[in-house]
Image (cartoon, rainbow, N blue to C red):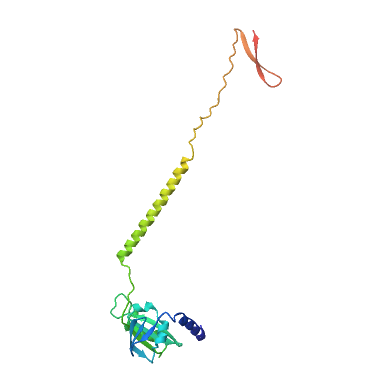
Amino acid sequence: MNRDHINELAEQQAERRQNLYLGTRLDRTHIEVNKHPFEIVLEYRDGFDLDKFVERFSPILNKYDYIVGDWGFEQLRLKGFYRDDVKDVQRSQTIGAVQDYLYEYCNFGCAYFVLKNERVIKPKRTSTHNRKETNKRDNNKQSRNRSNRSSSRSKQRRKSNHKFTTKQKAAPFTEKQKKPANVAAKTGQQARTKKQSNGKRHFTIRQK
């Protein structure tokens, strides 16, 4: 990315942010941005420019105790730092490490400044208890939703079952046995079968 393209992007951003923030210089060392007060505690090589600072300003910087601005390629960069006595932050995020930041991340001999935030606005943090209560409510809501869906499905199944009529089971099939014909034969008579020409058999009774 060349310098001309960087300048073009910066100009576009400045146009979008032109009416978002209003900077006011109260005296040589005090300024305000949208009525938020800052103090200039250090300025190296006339590094502070109010108009450029307002163009680059973001409300997220209000949570820091100090704001450091440095120049590179004719562009201003802002970074926030906490006080040295703030707990639960890394040393590289405290103002005591600002010289290390300037040496490692900024152009050698660049112009820079340090502002002190006179009204720090800490972001609201959700307590552990509130997070647990929120998670508990969410879990209970999900359980109720699952229960309602299960109950609805059960009702639908019961309605579907009522639409069908129970059919009588058919009696098991049993093959009927034909009883053999009773042939009454007189004494001394025998029953014989003769095969006819068409292949069928019939009984004949022959006298002895």
Q: How many marks?
A: 0
Residue 79 found in image quarter: bottom left
User: In this rendering, is residue 199 above or below 124?
Assistant: above
User: In this rendering, is residue 160 above or below 63?
Assistant: above
Residue 30 found in image quarter: bottom left
Q: Residue 130 placed where, x, y %?
A: 31, 64
- Rendered-image quadrant of the C terminus: top right
From the viewer's perspective, is 157 left or right of 195?
left
Residue 205 found in image quarter: top right
Residue 7 shows in the view: yes
Residue at 41 percent of width and 48 percent of height: 151
Q: Nearer the viewer, residue 23 or 199?
A: 23
Q: Nearer the viewer, residue 63 or 72?
A: 63
User: In this rendering, is residue 65 above or below 162?
Assistant: below
Q: Residue 50 placed where, x, y %?
A: 39, 87
From the viewer's perspective, is 206 left or right of 7?
right
Residue projecting furthest to the bottom:
45
Residue 106 shows in the view: no
Residue at 38 percent of width and 56 percent of height: 142
Q: Residue 166 placed where, x, y %?
A: 48, 36
Residue projecting furthest to the left:
85
From the viewer's perspective, is 87 left or right of 46?
left
Q: Residue 180 placed where, x, y %?
A: 58, 18
